Amino acid sequence: MSSYYDVLLENSFTNYRTLIEKITYHPSMAVYLTYMNNRATNVEKQTFPDENYAREIMQLFSIGLFQLNLDGTEKKDGAGKSIPTYNNDDIANLAKVFTGLSWGDSKYLGDFVKDYWSYTKKLKFYPIDSSDAYLRDWLPPSSWVIVNGHEVGPKTFLGSTIPTRSVQQGELDIKDALDILYNHPNVGPFIGRRLIQRLVTSNPSPAYIQRVATVFNNNGSGVRGDLKAVVRAVLLDPEARDCCNNGDTQFAGAFKEPFIRYTNLVKGLNLTASGGVFRNVMRRAYDKMGQIPMYSPSVFNFFAPDYMPDGAMKGTGKYGPEFQTLNSQTLTGYLNALNSWIIVDDVIEYTTYFSGETYKPQQEPGFILTADYPLTRNDRLPQLLDKYNLILAHGRLSQKTLDIIKGALLQMPISVTNGVPNADDASRRVRLAIYLIMVTPDYLINK
């Protein structure tokens, strides 16, 4: 997975067309969406190419389910119904493109010997399915069954046709297929809305989406799919900078998903480990919050982009994708996890050790907060809160929220000698301040 994440990181600001090709040829994606060792149609055996990746690259990675206007609104037919972007025939034909691919270091299509598996090497085309020859090399060649690994013949999807090519030209088929997807008019508004939802707000206006989609279509220099320009457009749009959705303060921003809160904490407070070892399992805490990295329940992730929480948001047609992770169990689980991380200082959870490794409590990571102890005196509490308001909440805590937290801190007794707070008392105040900030709506709604 580290290799796959490296691909995402290295191509975050390149071109969208480059990115989808890189992930298409990555073995992690091929295993996850089951087109590794995908074989051509065999009419005699009534077997057909796996359609998983063909479906998801359209539905989730490029064009979505319905045709879109440039502003992200759905196009309608004469009866007022949404118009699908693709049908089952499109999926079946696109699936034929992704046949004949296997491990970059295997001997043949369908090689299941782990010695040949490499999750860092680009997938390799195996035009001929010669697995029978390898598996039956003790029999005479006349008994071997050699068939096409990659599907030949024309492949029509989304109104375009990939021409008939030889079985050795599978990479050209993939190139043409990705070009067709890349140039579809849906990609700009579809990808634009997803990026806005993850980076800025769950409910961007159609005008906001259109501005971002326009940059996707042309970065100003005639280049389509320039992700660096698109991200810049997302973050520097007037609707992003005012934090208020053009005056709609009630539904501005986005609910912070649980793992983002955890990374906010450990990065903002500069989690420190002796020796620089950060081997973190944290399974119990993740279970409490309902979100474990790389363990989404399906390819559709932990939440849907069009999820509407019950109540005022659903009543006004507003989306809140990340709220899908929130329920009575994960709400209390988050409070308990925060208590472990901040109050107990149990921020890293080890469960297993490598061979020969022993537990060394002095190397366990923790927060070093002693520099904040002078700010825990009653007269300096505003400075303490200002600091963590900036670090954790980008300065978004309201004065009412700050006053409530200050009042709670003042209820905690503190001993001060010659202007220096008692270390234990000061530690409790700092940790409670951080805890209370991270449970406020001001913090939990990212703006």
Image (cartoon, grey):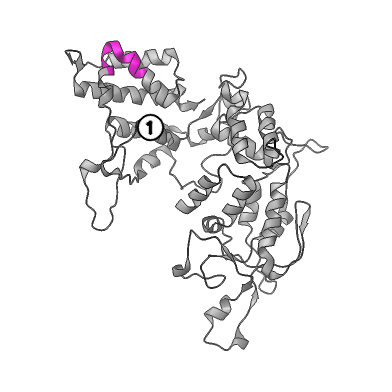
Residue 417 lies, in percent from the top left, at 16, 14
Q: For residue 284, which quarter of the picture?
A: top left
Q: For residue 195, which quarter of the picture?
A: top right
Q: Residues within 10 Å of mark 1 (few under 14, many from 20)?
A: many
Residue 107 lies, in percent from the top left, at 53, 73
Q: Is residue 219 above or below residue 51?
A: above
Q: Is residue 133 above or below residue 243?
A: below
Q: For residue 424, which quarter of the picture?
A: top left
Q: Which residues are magenta?
A: 375-385
Q: What is the magenta segment's predominant secondary structure?
A: helix
| Residue type, numbered disc 1 | Leu
Q: Which one is in front, 320 or 151?
A: 151
Q: Is residue 315 left or right of 120 when viewed as pictured? A: right
Q: Is residue 424 left or right of 145 when viewed as pictured? A: left
Which residue does the image show at 80% across and 38% down from the upper left?
Answer: 77
Q: State the SS at label 1.
A: helix
What residue is pinned by disc 1?
Answer: 265
Q: Which one is in front, 164 or 94?
A: 164
Which residue does the image show at 33% across and 22% down from the upper left?
Answer: 433
Q: Which one is in front, 177 or 297?
A: 177
* Residue 373 drawn in magenta: no
